[in-house]
Amino acid sequence: MDFALSEEQQMMIETARKVGEAFGPDYWRAKDADKAFPVECWQAVCDSGLAGAMLPEDLGGAGLGMVEVALIIEELCAAGAGATLAQVFMLNPIFGGVSVAKYGTDQMKADWLPKLCTGEMQFCMALTEPDAGTNSLELRTTVVPDGDGWQLNGQKIWITGVPQSHKMLVVTRSTPIDQAPKKTHGISLFMIDTDREGVSHAAIDKLGTNTLPSSQVFFDNVRIEADELIGDLDKGWHQLLDVLNTERIVTTAGLIGAGRLAIRLGVDYAKERRVFGDRPIGSYQSLQFPLAQHWAELEAAKLLNLKAASFFDNGLPFGSESNAAKLIASQATSAVAEQSMQVMGGMGFSKEMHVERLWRDARLFRFAPVSEEMILNYIAMANLGLPRSY
């Protein structure tokens, strides 16, 4: 195995670093305070060609792979954004890009993917429901045939980036679960206009990730056209898993970047701060050891995440690797953000020092997009051969 980066990858990382540094921690602190979408930053990402890294060249992308996407996201997030910027990649290159590039029609690809790459079009995905969180097979949002299309009704919750999106990937039941030959049958994916008649949404007040709104979404007799189906009717479950597993890779890359940023902020403070005499507090092992421990954890998560990304690029199963990497990264980043706050003492509690935002944002990913408990359930069954526990 060759762990050395190619010249092209190194140039791409340098581009991501420069874009990220142009929108440093102060920019993100202001956006967080205003609960404002990072319009300028995302447009710069698109203008630099990074948003379309893994999309086909003939559709405006760079034709690279998920490995490159993970490296790009990590560098952007480490420069100042923290984990939040990775969510914008989830919305667009993943929810929009992967679903359309792999399962959309040629017309969808031609119409939407170039606009995704340039920033003219944004996406979101409506999956989670009030009574179907982790257990997505219990979806109650439904479509029923209506002429040559369908009629959509139901409710979603914790849907990210709805107000900014032009298109929404809706996951719904097209065959009632009690009529399906098995639970995984009867799931379908549709890409609809966010501003369509019958679609409404309301923001959820929350602890962190304030630069991206989370919403409740309601569908009231929403018309879906025949050409808005993504993939195959009733057979969308495994297509959805393709999207969700790549979402884990993106999440982990953002967490690793956020963890690197938290360590850098904590280390910089510890090198300068003196309390007892002339020695900086960074010379105390009680502060060094936790930061060093979390650095090691983040490096391990990065290698596992890049392995998952490489498997994806080569058409190999990658669920175990992507889930395990996300488990380690979410725990390590949440812990190191809190540890950096502890290094700073009272100043760590101030917004001026930035780590409190990293801590608030990172905490989400202990249970999203999939919880620690469900990852451990998966590993126990898929990797250890233990019986199903839920």
Image: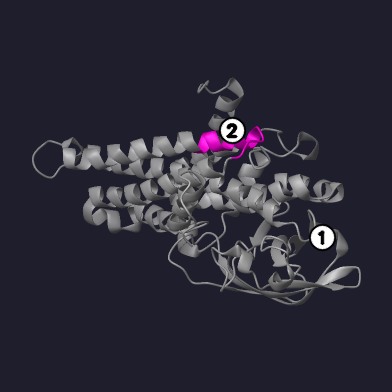
Q: Quadrant of residue 29 in the image?
A: bottom left
Q: Nearer the viewer, residue 188 or 72?
A: 188
**Label 2: few (<14), some or many (≥20) within 10 Å?**
some
Q: As drawn, is 208 to the left or to the right of 179?
A: left
Q: Which residue is mark 1?
A: 228
Q: As drawn, is 134 to the left or to the right of 99?
A: left
Name the residue: 72% across, 54% down.
121
Q: Quick check: is 301 in the magenta stretch?
A: no
Q: Quick check: is 306 in the magenta stretch?
A: yes
Name the residue: 61% across, 24% down.
8
Q: Quadrant of residue 151 in the image?
A: bottom right
Question: Secondary structure beneath disc 2?
Answer: helix
Q: Nearer the viewer, residue 335 or 351?
A: 335
What's drawn in magenta, residue-wise? 305-317
Name the residue: 73% across, 67% down.
180
Name the residue: 54% across, 30% down.
14
Vertical order, 356 against 23 (above or below): below
The percent coordinates of residue 304 (x first, y second) are: 48, 36
Q: Nearer the viewer, residue 203 or 109?
A: 109
Residue 142 appears in view:
yes
The percent coordinates of residue 278 (x first, y second) are: 11, 36
Label drawn at residue 310: 2
Q: As drawn, is 94 to the left or to the right of 377?
A: right
Residue 82 appears in view:
no
The percent coordinates of residue 199 (x first, y second) are: 72, 73
Furthest residue to the bottom?
220
Vertical order, 389 against 283 (above or below): below
Vertical order, 327 against 306 (above or below): below
Prevailing secondary structure class for the magenta stretch in the rendered image: helix
The amino acid at mark 1 is Glu
